[in-house]
Image (spheres, coloured by chain):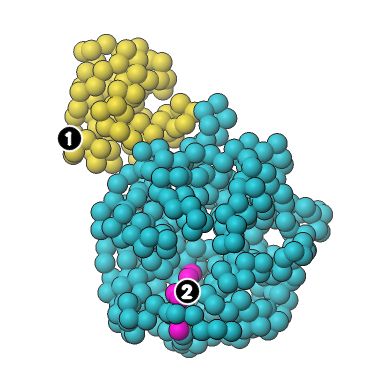
Chain colours: A cyan, B yellow
Amino acid sequence: MAKAKTARGRGTTLLIATRKGLWQLHSEATRRTWRLAGPQFLGHIVHHCVADSRDRRTMLAAARTGHLGPTIFRSSDRGRTWHEAKQPPAFREGSGRVVDHTFWLTPGHVSTPGVWYAGTSPQGLFRSEDGGATWHGVDGFNDHPQRKAWCGGDQDATPDGPKLHSVLIDPRDARHMYIGMSSGGVFESTDGGADWRPLNRGVRADFLPDPDPEYGHDPHCVRMHPALPDRLYQQNHCGIYRLDRPAERWQDIGATMPKSVGAIGFPMVLHPRDPETLWVFPMDGSSVWPRVSPGGKPAVYRSVNGGKSWQRHATGLPRTQAWLTVKRQAMTGDADDPVGVYFGSTSGEIWGSRDEGRTWKCLAAHLPHVYAVEVA
Amino acid sequence: MRVLIPNPLRSYTADAVAVVALGKTLAELTEDLDARYPGMRFRVIDEQGQIRQHIKFFVNGAQIRSLAEPLSDEDEVMIVCALSGG
């Protein structure tokens, strides 16, 4: 495996989206010391903030407040100043559907500067062609004749609203994309979103009567490897899976996790260069789904062989009575060597590792409930 | 007519507590507000033309639930964010 150029010398910036605003954590080149900056949008619920790696200047933040409708804020100077979108994501008038919030943001393909995608709650897919200033529904999904069957009705939604997330664009082909839905599963388009099909075989849906249904699954986070786009992984409500295209059936790679820990969690991070290495943050999925660190002992699990085996990494994390919840967008990795891995908890802590997850340090505490952590 | 703006919306009005807007109905008033303060309408009215769940409109002190409510120039409209959150 060739060693790619890293970002050494520039330091790392984390974008921390929380229930009460947006913060940034900045490090110097060694990633040993960190400086917290913020808040911006104090009081706003910021679900996701993402930097555009295509121009290194643009950032988008998906926000709403407790009362006001959802919107998108845009920055063209790396977050120093922000302007509101002229036309945030909204369903078609007459459709009867209302966007509660934009949940997920993804920059488009490198060949389409200015294109962004947004996933919403309830599930909707939107596209911008002007850097997030105006948004339009991807009719091929939002008005797909099968969408209601795929997504289910209101009674099928998660308590905090069903979500469309994990919008993945194939780096080889701007028209090839995947999405995940918390109520629905993983779907694929090969024509820029005009048509979609489910891609869920092999993934369990224990909460449904059919043990191997075509759709209706609950993927929590789906990732595509940037250097090997035919390699997909997902952290699902029912385990951890891997798919090597053109295969159509996911393989269960969570079965090798320790039984006392289980294979349930929300986030998943892939190594930027090695398709065999990934990290997950298991949470208790038993009984009423506490979704906190199993036994109160938080740990990150890493695989270096595509999920054949897993290693527990917890050095530096609290050893006991630490009931952490890490949401699906709240764990990320930088492109440095060794890779830095970071996560934020709903209890307002940001943890970071400079050595690919082996050891951990608390980078910030006393923040509000963290929804998302991304590297800028 | 005079429109009283709640705190969460004052980022649109350069912190003005009260503004002037026109409209023969509450719907027209919200469209006029949006023309003067772009983006404000979508934060209180959803894409299906309904008042958002935690927003209330009062006209001369009485809560109004329909955007078809007729208005006159002497009316005072208050936009209120219902108590909620945490």
Left or right relative to A112: residue A306? right
Q: Which amino acid is tagged 1? A: Ala
Nearest the camera: B31 or A170? A170
Residue A33 percent across, percent down from the top left? 30, 82
Residue A118 percent across, percent down from the top left? 50, 49
Q: Which residues are magenta?
A: A331-337
Mark 2 in CB contact with mark 1 (< 8 angstroms)? no
Quarter of the image for the N terminus of chain A: give it: bottom right
Residue of label 2: A333
Q: Which amino acid is tagged 2? A: Gly
Q: How many marks?
A: 2
Q: Is residue A333 magenta?
A: yes
Left or right relative to A270: residue B65? left
Specify whether residue A111 is in view: yes
Q: Which mark is residue B16?
A: 1
Chain hosting mark 1: B
Q: Residue at x 36, y 63 (%)?
A: A56
